Image (cartoon, rainbow, N blue to C red):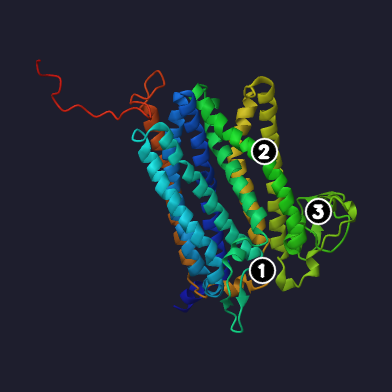
Amino acid sequence: MHALAQVLAVDPVPWARAQMAFTLATHIILVPLGVSWAFMTLIANYRGIRHGDADALRLAQRWSKYMAVLFAVGAVTGTVLSFEFGLLWPNFMDRFGPAFGIPFAFEGLFFFTEAIFIAIYIYGWKRLKPWAHFWSGVPIVIAGIGGSLAVVAANAWMNHPAGFRLNQAGRVVDVDPVAVIFNKAMPLQSLHMLIAAYLVGGFVVASVYATAMLRGKRDRYHRLGFLIPFTVAAVAVPIQMVVGDQLARFVYNNEPRKFAAMELVPETSRDVPETLGGWLNDDGEVVGGIPIPGLASILSDPGEGTSTKIRGLESFPADERPTNRQATIVHWAWDVMVGLGTALFLLAAWFAVVWWRRRDLPRTKWFLRAAAVAGVASVVTMEAGWVVTEVGRQPWIVVDYMLVEDAATSSSGVWVTFLGIAAIYTGVAVTTVLVLRAMRRRFDAAEDHSGNSDLSGPYSPRIRPEPVGAGTQEA
């Protein structure tokens, strides 16, 4: 019994961190599709109505059904995250809940609005007039954007808490909802995530059709299914690079601890190199990597160039900055995000140049292979960006107000819930994939040899089965 008690009596903080990281990393994969797929569906829907394009209408109808399934799964994983704030971080919610919870209240309103109009949009096929049905999908796009901005506002508040005052008992009072939501980090961080949602959603959906085209499905339906989302992603990439550059400078000016970890800068100095790879050893020294002389200083402030001073990790108290191991993780994630983001930009540029010259896709299979990989690459890029944001804030859960270890639950059984959540999420993921594959097979089986649905078009009258024996009686 004593040995069992020792096994169960584990430090809850690492397990709480692990569970939150796992559920967030899983849920965040669904967010881009929830935010951007409705927009891409409406593009197909508009084209189908405006130009009488049957393939575009068929895409819109199918995408709306896939979108509904993923929205339902995202609702489940998102709800788990909401409960985890109270279960894993009770001290944090007890003290800062009155401020931190405000953006989530707005996110809840956007979520229910999105759910209502998704139901109307799907139910409206064959029941609403074409343009009335199209406009019923617009609130889905708006609600998706609003919900994303609200959630990221809450995360940005953790980096730059504002809009409240602590009384003598350490309780939050005098909460200003506007100042909480529109905190210092909110504009750029929210815009960065919103554009990422369209970038990732576009590449993920396009990668499915790129894979199908590599397998010989080069008909107009699959070509259109590739072009719409890939174009959305290709437009988003250069915008994201500009926003990302501005956000990196914001971090340099306002979050020096995080920036030092991103650039792997142990000591305050000028003419700091941009180190590709490498890590901090136990003595806080940079080991390995490929240094590009002066580039980190130049990118931090182009006006000052190599004379730009970057504050090092050692200038902060050891208990108020990321550990050497955490700093290395942040740096690697930063390298992955920037590296893969650059690769996606080059892929988008390849597509743009060829389309501008020939109004056609690049004809080499290597382009489709790269586009097929881009879906996974974009998800990895987004996950790496969130690692930079979350691990770079360590050891704080609310910067300069509360440490992670002070916010966590004292329950030593957190590891049990982590294993349970991991098993449940694995089951949900497998089930979701099986459902989506079954839907695709059913959609394919419903088509005749001409490529048209053996049912009527999306806006045609619904076909009712004739009663048994109808047509057999003599006139």
Q: Which sits in the foreground, 188 or 469?
A: 188
Instruction: Tally the marks.
Output: 3
Q: As shown in the figure, which amino acid type bears the numbered disc 1?
A: Val
The residue pinned by badge 1 equals 399
Q: As shown in the figure, which amino acid type bears the numbered disc 2?
A: Leu
Q: Which mark is residue 300?
A: 3
Separation of residues labelled 3 and 1 (CA atoms)? 22 Å
The residue pinned by badge 2 equals 344
Q: Is residue 398 left or right of residue 73?
A: right
Q: Is residue 272 left or right of residue 37?
A: right
Separation of residues labelled 3 and 2 (CA atoms)? 23 Å
Q: Which mark is residue 252?
A: none
- For numbered disc 1, what is the local secondary structure? loop
Q: Dividing the picture into quarters, in which one does residue 451 lie?
A: top left
Separation of residues labelled 1 and 2 (CA atoms)? 33 Å
Residue at the (89%, 52%) spot, across then down: 306
